[in-house]
Each structure stands twice: as structure tokens, then as C-alpha cells.
Image: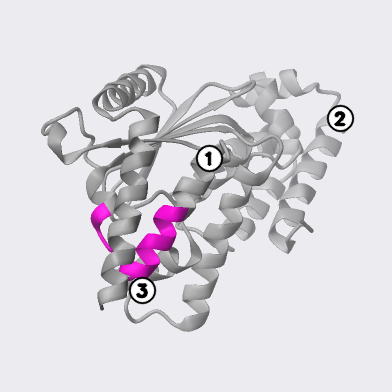
């Protein structure tokens, strides 16, 4: 896939960072020590795998004496968003994650959504959205999902509550297609999906969506989201608590085999409903 103008701009950011670091006679580790991140993080900034936080960009300017170049470029690039501000870094982290674990209590996770399901969700959240805005949102979500088609795709674990299968987002036909897509991803071994059934009753449910991500050479992170905001967490003790909560959710879920049976049964229910309407 050809790089977008936005990704090319971040690659330029990385190239300039590398050039100016080397001009200053610093290794990645030496620069990282001075701006309070690891040398591996500096390498990921230079390769445009990750985007630095604003405070990191500011400290880089101070250490390399670049007169605010990286801070100004950060502001310019961050204004050109396709995702909500609180979610944009999560999208970048998904690209380099070796393992992603999600808990979705209300809707199908974005990485598993079909275009019709994503479109229906977008319109339900903003019924006044323009066609162009809806298309851009759906296209961005489908682009994210391409990481599951890569040869280097991450391990992808998902825990759903059964109500996610039963709520006919976009109507019964669209929902049947959506569940069929999930089943296809399971069979292709691109995702391991488990469902917490209604019959389970109370369990260690989170207040909203939870995403855990692991990386080859960086600490794990957690991301929690509610309807209007999200929080990216890298504090080790909090991430560990989130991982334990996810483990308890997996214990409450059906086995992968039984979950696939339930997903296919729910898909057939939606197809039956679509035929009678």
C-alpha cells in the first residue's frame, strides 16, 4: 500500500530526527536517556512506527537545540487527524504490537468490523454526519483492520459479551454479515474470539472497552474507552491490574469452539429475521 501524505510527513519527521541526532554525535540510547525514553523508542520515532508525545518532541528540541522544529512539526501533523485525538496513538501502537487483547462489552471491535456495520455505528453516533464524513470514518476503520491481513499480524484475542452478537446494528442482514465475517476471521486463525454468555450472570466486567497491547521491544500498554473519551495507560502496576482483569474475563467466557458455535447460531438467527422482514 502506498504511503499517505500523512505517513510520509511522519517519515520526514523521523528522518530529520535521525539526521539531527547524528549531527549532534548522539546514539539513539544517548538521546533517549536525555529525553527520558528508551533508545528503542527513539528508533521507532525515526522509523515512523511511533509518534512522540508533545513533551518528548519538546525535550528533543531542547537537547538537539533545534529551535522548536520538532514541536512545531508535531503540532502541524497532529492537527491532520483521521481519528479522535485520544485514539490516534492507539492506532499507531496497533501497527507495531505483537499481541492485542480486546474486551468489547457493547459493540464489535473496530478491527473486526465490516464496512456496513461500521457505517451503521457511525450514523447512530452522529445522525447528522455528511456522506463524506461517514465514508472517511469507515475507510479509516477498514484501513486499521488491514494489520490482520499482514504476514506479521499480531496475535489477536477478543472477548465479547453475548449482547454484542444479539444487537442488530444496521439491521438483521448487516448483523448476519458481520457475524459471518467474525466467524471467517476465526477460521482463518486471524483472531481468537470468546463470548461471555448471558447465562454467566455477573462477572469481572470492565466499565467500558479494554485493549491490551504487547510489543517486541517496549513495555505493554492498556487502553480503556467509554463513549466519549479514551485513556492510554503505560503505568506498569495499572497495566498489570488490567491484564489480571482480562484474564478473569477469559475465564468467564465460553471456549473458543463453543463461542464460534454461538456466533454462528446468532448469525443464523439474524438471517432468519432478515428473511421475514
Q: Is residue 171 magenta?
A: yes
Residue 103 visible in image: no
Q: Secondary structure at mark 1?
A: helix
Q: Which mark is residue 58?
A: none
Sequence order check, earlier mark of 2 and 3:
2
Q: Nearer the viewer, residue 259 or 217?
A: 259
Q: CA distance from mark 1 to mark 2?
A: 48 Å
Q: Which residue is mark 3?
A: 123
Q: Nearer the viewer, residue 111 or 65?
A: 111
Q: CA distance from mark 3 to mark 1?
A: 30 Å
205 versus 113 height, above or below = above
Quarter of the image containing the N terminus? Answer: bottom right
Q: CA distance from mark 2 to mark 3?
A: 49 Å
256 versus 81 height, above or below = above
Residue in the picture at 63% in, 22% down: 216
Q: Nearer the viewer, residue 43 or 153?
A: 153
103 versus 219 height, above or below = below
Give the colouring mode of the picture: one colour
Q: Main secondary structure of the magenta part?
A: helix
Q: Secondary structure at mark 3?
A: helix
Q: Which residue is mark 1?
A: 187
Residue in the picture at 63% in, 57% down: 77
Sequence order check, earlier mark of 3 and 1:
3
Outermost residue toward the left? 201
Where is residue 165 shown, x and y percent of the image?
29, 51
Residue 161 visible in image: yes
Sequence order check, earlier mark of 1 and 2:
2
Residue in the picture at 30% in, 52% down: 266
Instruction: Bin the neighbour count of mark 1 within 10 Å (Cα to Cα): few under 14, some 14-19, many 20 and up.
Output: few
The region drawn magenta spans: 166-180
Q: Which mark is residue 22?
A: 2
Amino acid at each position: 500500500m502506498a504511503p499517505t501524505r500523512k505517513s510520509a510527513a511522519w517519515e520526514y519527521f523521523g528522518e530529520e530526527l535521525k539526521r539531527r541526532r547524528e549531527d549532534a554525535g548522539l546514539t539513539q540510547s544517548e538521546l533517549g536517556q536525555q529525553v527520558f525514553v528508551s533508545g528503542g523508542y527513539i528508533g521507532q520515532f525515526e522509523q515512523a512506527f511511533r509518534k512522540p508525545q508533545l513533551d518528548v518532541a519538546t525535550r528533543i528540541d531542547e537537547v538537539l537545540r533545534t529551535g522548536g522544529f520538532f514541536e512545531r512539526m508535531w503540532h502541524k501533523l497532529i492537527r491532520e487527524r483521521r481519528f479522535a485525538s485520544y485514539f490516534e496513538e492507539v492506532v499507531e501502537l496497533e501497527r507495531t504490537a505483537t499481541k492485542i487483547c480486546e474486551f468489547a462489552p457493547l459493540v464489535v471491535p473496530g478491527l473486526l468490523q465490516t464496512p456496513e456495520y461500521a457505517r451503521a455505528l457511525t450514523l447512530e453516533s452522529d445522525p447528522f454526519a455528511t456522506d463524506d464524513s461517514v465514508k472517511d470514518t469507515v475507510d479509516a476503520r477498514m484501513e486499521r483492520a488491514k494489520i490482520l491481513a499482514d504476514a506479521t499480524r499480531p496475535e489477536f484475542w477478543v472477548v465479547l459479551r453475548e449482547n454484542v452478537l444479539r444487537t442488530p446494528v444496521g439491521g438483521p442482514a448487516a448483523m448476519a454479515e458481520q457475524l459471518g465475517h467474525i466467524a471467517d476471521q476465526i477460521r482463518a486463525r486471524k483472531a481468537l474470539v470468546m463470548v461471555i454468555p448471558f447465562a454467566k450472570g455477573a462477572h469481572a466486567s470492565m466499565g467500558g472497552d479494554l485493549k491490551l497491547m504487547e510489543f517486541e521491544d517496549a513495555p505493554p500498554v492498556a487502553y480503556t474507552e467509554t463513549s466519549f473519551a479514551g485513556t492510554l495507560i503505560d503505568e506498569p502496576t495499572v497495566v498489570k491490574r488490567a491484564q489480571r482483569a482480562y484474564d478473569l474475563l477469559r475465564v468467564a467466557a465460553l471456549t473458543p469452539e463453543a463461542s464460534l458455535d454461538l456466533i454462528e447460531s446468532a448469525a443464523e438467527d439474524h438471517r432468519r429475521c432478515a428473511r421475514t422482514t
